[in-house]
Image: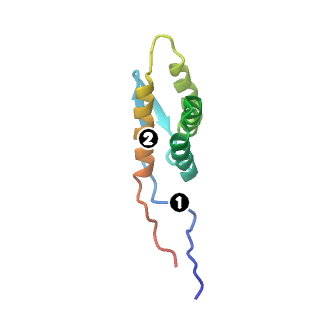
Amino acid sequence: MARFKDFGAGVVGEAVEPLSFKLHGDEFKCVDQIQGKVLLDLVSESNNSDDPAAAARIINVFFSTVLQTDEYTRFNELLESKDRIVSVETLGEITAWLVEEYTSRPTEGPEVS
């Protein structure tokens, strides 16, 4: 008997609820699901880099990936505002929360015969 497993379409779980967060009174809407590779890249880069610039790049890529396109533009404008400051710690908290939300889906899909 050959070793084989069909992973179907590669999507884990059913339809998911919309994901959003609020910062400085503005709500930002995220995409419902992201590629697993995005999370793997985030973990890999954050663990393997002592370079703060590299860490900043991966966080920017992460937000540009998880936020809907028009939302990312507004989010980036907020981060560049001189009046409404967003600390590095807050960005880290948002990132951690989003990662938790994206990974809290069931980890095993249905068995495919």
Residue 71 position within the rendered picture, expressed as x and y whole percent measured from the top left = 54, 30
Name which residue lies at 44% across and 16% down.
85
What's under tag 2, amino acid-wise? Leu
**Which residue position is annotated with label 2?**
98
Quadrant hosting residue 21:
top left
- Looking at the picture, the colour scheme in use is rainbow
- Mark 1–mark 2 distance (CA, rounded to whole Å): 18 Å
| Residue 103 to residue 25: above or below | below
Going by the image, does 22 lie left or right of 79? left
Q: Quadrant of the N terminus?
A: bottom right
Q: Nearer the viewer, mark 1 or mark 2?
A: 2
Tell me if mark 1 has few (under 14), some (14-19) or many (20+) residues whose alpha carbon lies within 10 angstroms of its own. few
What's under tag 1, amino acid-wise? Val
Residue 104 position within the rendered picture, expressed as x and y whole percent measured from the top left = 39, 52
Residue 92 position within the rendered picture, expressed as x and y whole percent measured from the top left = 43, 32
Query: Which badge, 1 or 2, is on the more N-terminal residue?
Result: 1
Front in this rendered view, residue 74 or 102: 102
Name which residue lies at 52% across and 79% down.
113
Front in this rendered view, residue 37 or 11: 37
Which residue appears farthest toward the top when viewing the image?
83
Q: Are marks 1 and 2 in contact (CB under 8 Å)?
A: no
**Which residue position is annotated with label 1?**
11
Give the total number of marks visible in the rendering.
2
* Mark sitting on residue 49: none
Quadrant hosting residue 26:
top left
Quadrant hosting residue 80:
top right
Secondary element type, mark 2: helix
Q: Is residue 18 visible?
A: no
Name which residue lies at 43% across and 51% down.
103
Which residue appears farthest toward the bottom when viewing the image?
1
